[in-house]
Image (tube, helix red, strand yellow):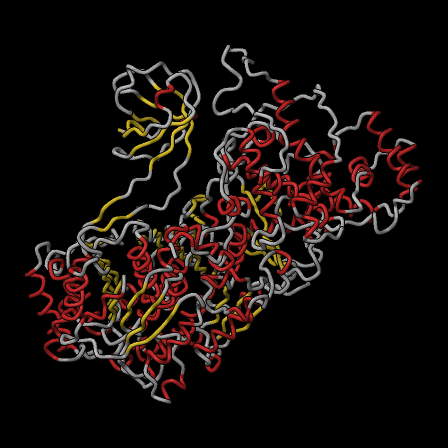
Amino acid sequence: MAADSMEIDDSLYSRQRYVLGDSAMHQMAQSSVFLSGMGGLGIEIAKNIVLAGVKAVTLHDTKQCETADLGSNFFIRKEDVLSQRRRVEAVCPRVAELNPYVHVDTSSSALDDNTDLSFLGKYQCVILSEARLSLQKRVNEFCHSHQPPIRFIGCDAYGICVRVFCDFGDEFEVSDPTGEEPKEIFIHSITQDDPGVVTCMDNQPHGIQTGQSVVFREVHGMVELNGTARPVSVLSPHSFSIGDTSQLQSYAHGGFFVMVKAPKTFRFETMEKQLCDPQVMTPDFSKPEAPLQIHAAMCALDVFQEQHSRLPNTGCLQDAEVLLKLTEEVNETLRNKAPVNTELVRCLSRTARGTLPPLAAAVGGLASQEVLKAITGKFAPLQQWFYLDAIEVVRPLQSVSAEEFLPRGDRYDGLRACIGESMCVELHKLRVFMVGCGAIGCEMLKNFALLGVGLANSSGEVFITDPDLIEKSNLNRQFLFRPHHIQKPKSTTAAEATQEINPELQVDAHLHKVCPATESIYNDVFYSRLNLVVTALDNVEARRYVDSRCLSNQKPLLDSGTMGTKGHTEIIVPNLTESYNSHRDPPEEEIPFCTLKSFPSVIEHTIQWARDKFENLFVHKPSMYNSFWQTHSSADAVLQKMQVGESLEGAFQVVKLLSKRPSQWDQCVVNARLKFEKYFKRKALQLLHSFPLDTRLKDGSLFWQSPKRPPAPFNFDLKDSLHFTFIVSTARLFAGIYNIPYSEADISEEAVTRILSGVKIPEYMPSQKCIETDESAKKPDSMKMPLSSEEEREAIAQLEQAIATDNVTAERLQVSPLLFEKDDDRNGHVDFVTSASALRARMYAIEPADRLKTKRIAGKIIPAIATATAAVAGLVALELIKVVGGYDFESFKNCFFNLAIPVMVLTEPAPLKQTLIRDNIYFSIWDCWTIFGHEDFTLSEFMNAVREKYGMEPTMVVHGVKMLYVPVMPGHSKRLKFTMQKLIKPSVDRRYVDLTVSFAPEADGDDDLPGPPVRYFLSRNGETP
């Protein structure tokens, strides 16, 4: 079967399809992978590539389950250790369960320097973890020289150091190095010159690099450019030259260009060659020499194992000195040297027998993405080494006694070897609140289970909350969930799955949203019992709210997010860093109303228009209809009010809907046909009537020029599949809101043709309606628009007719509004938006989008893949250890990565800003002044109390958006005698309010001085009054 004819299960893979594309998905589904080493790193890679959907994976391992495995491998259970099962046998069924489309088998044969490697010939990619360098070099050599080359990846994790090595052969072609979608950029001008210079419209940045090519479309005047690709030389962010245009016709107007995606070939060397002169990626620019220093230390660690047949003993100073000497020797052999980092080598020696599960998760995510690149050629591969250390986690622990790090025969031995017993105990005692149990949430819970965060017997606890139920599309990356969990709550299901990994964990699962409405549950008392908060959310608004609660309650917040292969982490620590709300992303650009309504220029405009039509026809109007008849239950009473000229909001629209309400399927089809006529013929005719093609603006330029496109009306043709899909999907949605039954036969072409054959379409008459062309104009509210006397008369007549014909029964005054559901392909929602958008695109000669792209844009789907999710959660969990240890500012790291390119950048968090009030009095976002009042406490007493306690004269007091005291406002001076209770009107359970207070400047005429929020407690002891 040809690769591209294979069906992709969109209900499972939809979010990942948007990351990788269908071609890569098909290639994965034909690829077999060999993965050796079922330790913490190996199991991470196994999880991620099986979720992604390769054809087959062979898991290889020769070791037995041991107690220490429980702290690094989330698929090994206590009973596996007790029954002395092989690791590979224990994990295989649990890995296989992640994805029914992937065949998972096992091997426990010896893989060493004497093994015949010919069996690897059937795999497209081979990954070795927990293998010595001599074996890695031998397997790599075999893979590199095999025809066709087998892609090779070596991964290792020893204590605080991890590495990934890639060799994809002499020539590895990548179809799409970045994965970024090329944008259509409109042209302002093109010079007739050598070289010709292209300038973008509205100074839009083109995002192109010199050497890339662009293709031109719809250029007027210099028409020779259309359809041609030209190499580019960048002149500025919004202009570039394209070679000689002096012999072409002169540019008139319009047109756009799109960057051409060109494949790129990457060349790799074998590990043998690379060891002496490694090509490394630098993740942390504050320590640029770290990758080469870790390279030397990890190579020396391999020599140590060769010589001693073991790893250095935890805390053994003699072994550390031996490793240091070996590192110096290895460093001498490197062509490109960095000075040996003694501290790093000693920390590696001390922790080499240990494991940091979050570090394995972070690098496992990156390595898994490299596996997917190896078998698909999608995205630029790692060239050729990636090194990461977690020295900041262990640096403050170097003075702790050696006994702290020694094994105790439990699941935390690997972790203990890295961070010591005291720190393990602190993790066990932790009380954490995690908001969200989606993809990042599942990965975080896995990290909590392996780290022993929140153990019942240590009075620790993990509180989790998520109001959502599990859907099939979640299973592709939310790895704690299985098909039999679909439609069960995420939080309770995730809690059960986490306790399977570590039964000692105490997990309290809730189904609430965290928002102002649930503040009585997640109140200050709740926050006071927490040590820290973790967000695993997918929207900015919720993050902002949680951040404000953490700020108010002085709690650390660990935030992260992903979009496709990109990920970020942000660490917020009280009195050390800024908060999430300290920085604001620029608001999303809104499409102007007139562009959506009349002048679309790109496919995003037509998709948004179709989505808005869905909302208006099937959600907004039916909801308005219901609420109107709930308010006005009697149609006769409504008629009487309308007859005496009383204004009832929405009455005109509601009566119109009532009079046109279909009662059978045929009428739904007719309504759909009339909508087609209105949207795709009359709209175009009206626009061209109002603005004929030769219309010119005051400055003499053409009205219809880029980016404005003139519409072309078209006649209805049921033989056109797009026309048919629009009619059927629209009719089905009408039937849905009006509760009208229909059968499969009713939506057949014959049935629809029969119904439409008798439909008379009224002749088009141009209207004198004004068409909005101002891009700053907002959409008018149809409910509040004044009605003409003719419209009022028409509405009264329609309602009289409905009452006379007994069409105002309780049943007919009730409809069923829809809710846009993008993931159910049977409901016709995406069919409507796709066909409506494509027809409008055709009308305006815009390149249409396929169903998949339309669904992504209309459904605001965030592309997602398990690799990035695992990586961000691992990086956040590393920071969690530092927060628990109370580390200083320099220890913390925020991260941004894009696994596609690949790039990873670790930086210090934003340092805390101190704002000067006056005379060495500073405050930061974490500061809060407090005043304790009582029931009769007046505004005047409040201001005196602030003055006495803080030595500052209050000039203005504001509560939220309510001004309590602004001297210049009329009547405000009288308020000084009012009680605070009367001015604030707090809810019954409120203990305090945070007030914004400004202070008198030192000199007259200066601005008022800022200050921190003043927390006013409503009673003397701060209890609820």
Q: Quadrant of the C terminus?
A: bottom right
Q: Nearer the viewer, residue 268 or 831?
A: 831
Left-right relation of 173 to 498: left
Whether residue 929 is visible, yes or no, is: no
Q: Quadrant of residue 761?
A: top right
Whether residue 182 is visible, yes or no, is: yes
Measuring from the top left, give residue 545's x and y in whole percent.
54, 54
Measuring from the top left, give residue 35's x and y in whole percent.
29, 69
Classify 5 as above or below 646. below
Name the outermost residue toward the bottom: 83
Q: Nearer the viewer, residue 966 or 190?
A: 190
- Tell how many labels: 0
Classify 127 as above or below 707. below
Left-right relation of 8 to 985: left
Measuring from the top left, give residue 727's x and y in whole percent.
65, 41
Q: Nearer the viewer, residue 371 or 777?
A: 371
Classify 211 as above or below 34. above
* Residue shown at 31% from the left, 69% from the top: 41
Q: Quadrant of the N terminus?
A: bottom left
Measuring from the top left, give residue 236's x and y in whole percent.
31, 28
Q: Quadrant of residue 354?
A: bottom left
Classify 336 as above or below 344. above
